[in-house]
Image (spheres, rainbow, N blue to C red):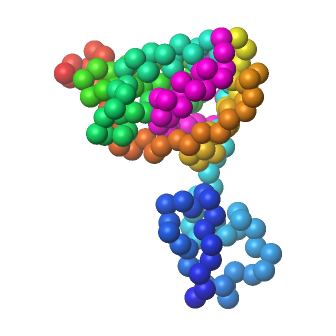
């Protein structure tokens, strides 16, 4: 077996070992992922109104703590599907969730976005226009009238869940 360098989309693995005799020359990345049993990341695209993004970022920043021993609480959870974007933030005592409509929605997304990066994106977006967002795995690329920026997202698994309003749980 020969060691092969890891592609950026395989960040969780320190290295990847494959039997080079079983992989023919000219194999595409897609074929290699299928061979290794790695699912294709589906690209998510959507467009959000800048004023909505600014409002959501301000409210999430008010709830999320500035410093905390649980780094996941420094993030806002963002879920996108069916033309809607939901954002949630909490500080372990209070919880904020809001949903807005997004345009040109393709695919779904569930990831955590550091609130400091969300605030940076909101400043970049300004208060007018739209922000086009492309998400591939845990990489978010945003395009605004003010330019383009790339941000790293965080796995949403450790983000604490709070009960939905009215479901009788406290």
In the image: residue 106, left or right of residue 159? right
Seen at 80% across and 75% down, the residue is 26
Q: Measured from the top left, where is residue 105 in percent x and y? A: 67, 29
Q: Is residue 68 left or right of residue 13?
A: left
Q: Is residue 40 above or below residue 165?
A: below
- Quick one: which residue is furthest to the left in this view? 170
The residue lying furthest to the right in this view is 26
In this view of the protein, can residue 5 be seen by the observer?
A: yes
| Residue under the image location 58 percent in, 27 percent down | 120
Q: Nearer the viewer, residue 122 or 20?
A: 122
The C terminus, quarter of image: top left
Residue 160, image quadrant: top left
Determine whether, in the image, residue 24 is placed left or right of residue 161: right
Pinpoint residue 154: horizontal percent, then vertical percent.
48, 43
Q: Position of residue 111 (x, y in %)?
A: 49, 38
- The magenta segment: 101-127
Question: Depth check: 127 or 48 in front?
Answer: 127
Residue positioned most to the front: 67
Task: Give the number of callouts.
Answer: 0
Task: Assign the N terminus to one quadrant of the image.
Answer: bottom right
Q: Is residue 102 magenta?
A: yes
Residue 128 vertical placement versus 91 (above, below):
above
Q: What residue is shown at x 21% (from left), y 19% (from top)?
A: 168
- Up the image or down, 4 lies above or below 170; here it is below
Q: Is residue 144 left or right of residue 62?
A: right
């Amino acid at each position: 077996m020969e060691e092969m360098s890891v592609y950026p989309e395989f960040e969780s693995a320190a290295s990847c070992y494959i039997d080079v005799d079983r992989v023919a020359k000219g194999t595409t990345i897609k074929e290699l992922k299928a061979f290794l049993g790695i699912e294709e990341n589906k690209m998510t695209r959507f467009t959000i109104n800048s004023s909505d993004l600014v409002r959501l970022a301000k409210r999430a920043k008010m709830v999320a703590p500035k410093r905390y021993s649980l780094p996941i609480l420094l993030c806002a959870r963002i879920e996108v599907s069916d033309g809607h974007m939901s954002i949630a933030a909490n500080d372990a005592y209070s919880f904020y969730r809001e949903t807005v409509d997004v345009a040109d929605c393709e695919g779904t997304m569930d990831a955590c976005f550091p609130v400091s990066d969300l605030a940076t994106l909101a400043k970049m977006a300004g208060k007018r226009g739209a922000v086009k967002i492309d998400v591939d795995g845990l990489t978010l690329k945003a395009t605004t009238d003010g330019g383009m920026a790339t941000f790293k997202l965080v796995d949403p698994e450790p983000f604490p869940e709070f009960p939905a309003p009215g479901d009788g749980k406290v």
